[in-house]
Image: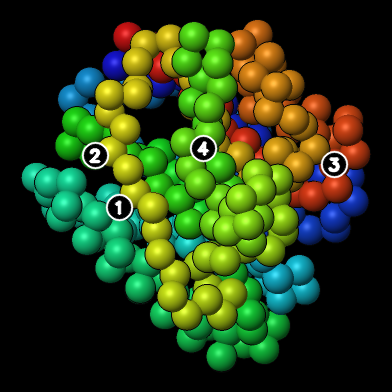
Amino acid sequence: MNLSISAASRVGCVRDINEDMVLFGEYFIRDEEYSETKNLNGCDRYLIALADGMGGHQSGEVASSETLHHLQYYFNDLPVGLNAGELNEAIVMWLNSINNTIDIRGREEAVCRGMGTTLVSLAYYGGDFYWINCGDSRIYRLHDNHLRQLSTDHSLNTLMGEREHSHVITNCIGGGCKNSFIDMVCCTPDVLPGDTFLLCSDGLTDMVPDDQIETMLAGDADASALCQRAEDLGGLDNVSAVVVRVGH
């Protein structure tokens, strides 16, 4: 199976610092764009992830970078042959570890106190695909030109039964969150040739409605085009996206 991947991460039109970061494979993206085609045949594991840092002057950009670098190392070091339950347990162990790492850095460096980040990921391990979510960054699937959000926002609005971003999140990595958790779902049956997956920060979905995203993805828009649309509509936040198109 081949994946055609495009990624972009931009500061937007208002913010001074880009606190988002994107990881796919061995590449880390911030304030740039990149694309590649990945052949998964014979591949044991492959990781795509996006983190939206929080904290402004309190180093949200440090939290997102720390989280993705930590995750990449941990994921690549996992033993082979874990089943879905064992993999989930390993990711929970990683969450506890990264929360501790960010907490320690926040206590040692005043500028990092209170920093945190969301995380959304599409991971391939041992022949299966998993999506992973902590916070309100999102993963979508476009199937037969219909866009559906797979992840659930960990936000106040979700608790209140509303779909819009509230900017008050109830779960994250770091950020003083004492009971962080991760949603992890095996989605192998959903990964079909011709489908498209989108991982994005709320800087995209706050600016560009889902129906516009659906139309753009159905028209073969890449991550850069989606980020540009968010900026054209005001770009009030950092905006990052990863578009993954599934081939044969």
Q: Secondary structure at mark 1?
A: helix
Quadrant in the picture for the C terminus: top left
The quarter holding residue 212 reads top right
Residue 49 visible? The answer is: no
Q: Position of residue 150 (x, y in %)?
A: 47, 36
Spatial distance from mark 2 to mark 3, Cα to Cα? 35 Å
Q: Which mark is residue 87?
A: none
- Residue shown at the point (90%, 39%) measured from the top left: 234
Q: Compare marks 2 and 3 and give the one earlier in the sequence.
A: 2
In the rendered structure, are the residues bearing label 4 and label 2 in contact, judged by CB atoms less than 8 Å apart? no
Which residue is disc 4 drawn over? 139
Q: Residue at x 37, y 11 (%)?
A: 193
Instruction: Give the CA separation, mark 1 to mark 4.
Output: 19 Å
- First in sequence: mark 4 vs mark 2: 2
Q: Which sits in the foreground, 111 or 100?
A: 100
**Image position of 76 (left or right of 201):** left
Residue topped by disc 1:
75
Residue 225, above or below 47: above
Earlier sequence position, callout 3 versus callout 4: 4
- Three-letter code, disc 1: Phe
- Mark 4, secondary structure of its residue: strand
Marks 3, 4: nearer the viewer: 4
Comparing marks 1 and 4, which lies closer to the viewer? Answer: 4
77 or 55, nearer to the observer: 55
Image point (58%, 58%), residue name: 159
Q: Judge the density around disc 1: few (<14), some (14-19), many (≥20) Cα neighbours within 10 Å.
A: some
Spatial CA span between label 4 and label 2 = 18 Å
Marks 4, 2: nearer the viewer: 4
Identify residue for label 2: 125
Residue type at mark 4: give it.
Answer: Ile
Disc 1 versus disc 2: distance between alpha carbons?
A: 9 Å
Give yes or no for contact between labels 1 and 2 (Cβ–Cβ under 8 Å): yes
